Amino acid sequence: MGGAGYLAASSALIAVFAENLAHPVKLFGVQALVAAMILVLCLVEARVAEQSDRRCDKVLAKFWHFWRHWYPHLFFLFCFEELGKLVHLVTPGWQDAKLISFDQWADGVNPSLWLERFRHPVLNEFMQFAYFSYFVFLLILGGIFYYRRDRESYWGVMTYSAVGYVFGYVISIFFPVQSPWFTFAGMWHGNLTGGPFTALINLIEKCGRVRGAAFPSQHVAGAVAALWGACGTGGGCSGYSFRVSSACAFQRLPKKPLCGGCPRGMVTGTLGYVIGRWVMWREGARPSKSSTSAPPPHFCT
């Protein structure tokens, strides 16, 4: 449902600001194709599930059942990569200067560059490991619920994640930020070095980096929404504590630019957290230790 709302909203924006795009008709076609594929997937899975009385039909039903539940992960990735085309749909210029000026005014230095002095392979690897948890958080949490056949919790997590992502995507369209990687290109003294997680993150960002979509943090918005979705449906919510603890520990390092600039440098994450949190409270979700029995929802995200 959140995904359908985003496709409708972004299509409407494309229609209104078509003159700012090089190929608006192509984008319309891609979005229509994606919407059609999701609709067909939902319809086919529902029909096959009703007719799965033979053994071969049951195997086919399991195939469609799997993709019916796991397609949101691919949809989120599609929307994120598409932002590279929509980032200047409404606002023609980058807004990084506003955030950089605020950091400079607040700290007297640029935290993104100042923090480079703490660069160390061990610290780099630890922080990249913590950052990597964002990429697998939804897969692991969804996989646990899917394995347990807890469809209510699974779709609660997916639906809340979709709504959290949608808010982040829309903000990115109206307030495009390209991120320090592009803004400060050539100003670093060297690349981060570390172990396997550092190398893995570098590979992921090299292959999937989008110029734009850096504000707010889609990782935080989606992870917090998924976490609270799990809590609200009784799925448990202890798995996220390590990520929060690692960020807090890093902020305890001394010096004003680090203690003051690091939280402001995490403003995208904070906004992402607010979005995810607002989604939960707006939908009436509350952390609980147990959930009441109810038939699993059959959403078409």
Image: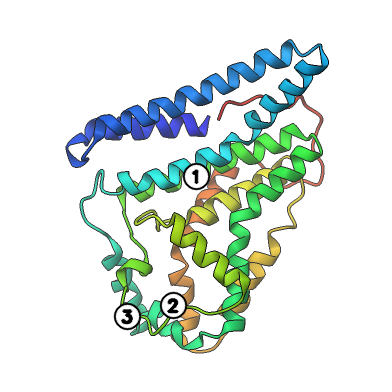
Q: Which amino acid does label 2 sit on?
A: Gly
Q: Name the residue under label 3.
A: 187
| Residue drawn where x is 65% and y is 41% of the image | 157
Element type where label 2 sits in the image: helix
| Residue drawn where x is 74% and y is 32% of the image | 151
| Residue drawn where x is 58% and y is 34% of the image | 71
Q: Which amino acid does label 3 sit on?
A: Met
- Whether 287 is drawn above or below 48: the answer is below
Q: Name the residue under label 1.
A: 77
Q: Position of residue 51 (x, y in %)?
A: 74, 10
Left or right: 129 as drawn, with respect to 90? right
Q: Answer few, some or many: residues within 10 Å of disc 1's Cα (few below 14, many 20 plus, some between 14 and 19).
A: few
Q: Mark 2 points at which residue?
A: 261
Element type where label 1 sits in the image: helix
Looking at marks 1 and 2 on the same chain, the residue that comes earlier in the sequence is marked by 1
Answer yes or no: do the residues labelled 1 and 2 have beta carbons within 8 Å? Answer: no
Left or right: 248 as drawn, with respect to 76? right
Q: Quadrant of the C terminus?
A: top right
Q: Which amino acid does label 1 sit on?
A: Leu
Nearest-to-viewer mark from 2 and 3:
3
Q: How many labels does the image show?
A: 3
